[in-house]
Image (spheres, grey):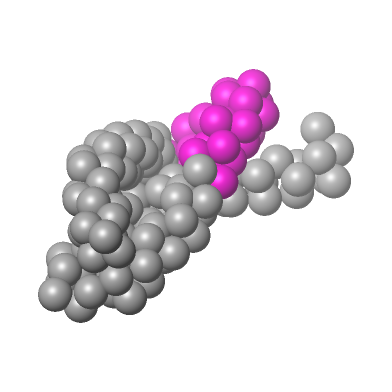
Amino acid sequence: MTPTAGIALMMNNYLHDVATALLLASAVALWAMLRRYDPAGGPGAARYFLAIHRSMTRLARFSLAWIVLGGVPRTIFYAEFEWANAAGRGQVGALLVKHVLAFGFVGAGAWLWLKLRRRVREVQGDLAAAIR
């Protein structure tokens, strides 16, 4: 692998890890905002929350796309780039922990986004009721 290709792959892998964390972080942030949402705030509060939701949804979709697309080169070069380096330095255990955490973050992020969907629909209903 050329040095330039190695740098590109390393950056892809780092950004892949960031996207993994961002998927969960965006869901947790939205959940925290939703906990503070008060229907008594009227249509302004609902509109504000729904605008934030749209932005967070775009962020989560971008993260999910990066996880999928960035995972392709990561998987192709995994044995050569990550496994060989970790095994050569006695860090297989650390690599295993990292992968367990990464899969857990993606799973928890996806689960939380799906769970939040019902509450977001309730906010949309609050807005519809307030407008009527």
Indicate whether 54 appears above or below 17: below
Q: Is residue 113 visible?
A: yes
Q: Residue at x 70, y 41 (%)?
A: 9
The x and y percentages for residue 8 are 76, 45
Q: Nearer the viewer, residue 121 or 125?
A: 125
Indicate whether 15 appears above or below 91: below
The x and y percentages for residue 46 are 29, 67
Q: Is residue 108 visible?
A: no
The x and y percentages for residue 17 are 49, 48
* Secondary structure character of the magenta stretch overall: helix
Task: Judge left or right: residue 29 versus residue 89.
Answer: left
Q: Residue at x 66, y 29 (%)?
A: 73
Q: Name the quarter where the N terminus is drawn.
A: top right
Q: Nearer the viewer, residue 48 or 34?
A: 48
Q: Is residue 82 magenta?
A: yes
Q: Is residue 48 magenta?
A: no
Determine which quarter of the picture holds residue 105: top left
The x and y percentages for residue 132 are 26, 60
Residue furthest front in the image: 132
Q: Nearer the viewer, residue 94 or 27?
A: 27
Q: Residue at x 58, y 24 (%)?
A: 75
Q: Nearer the viewer, residue 131 or 124?
A: 131
Q: How many marks?
A: 0
Q: Which residues are magenta?
A: 62-90
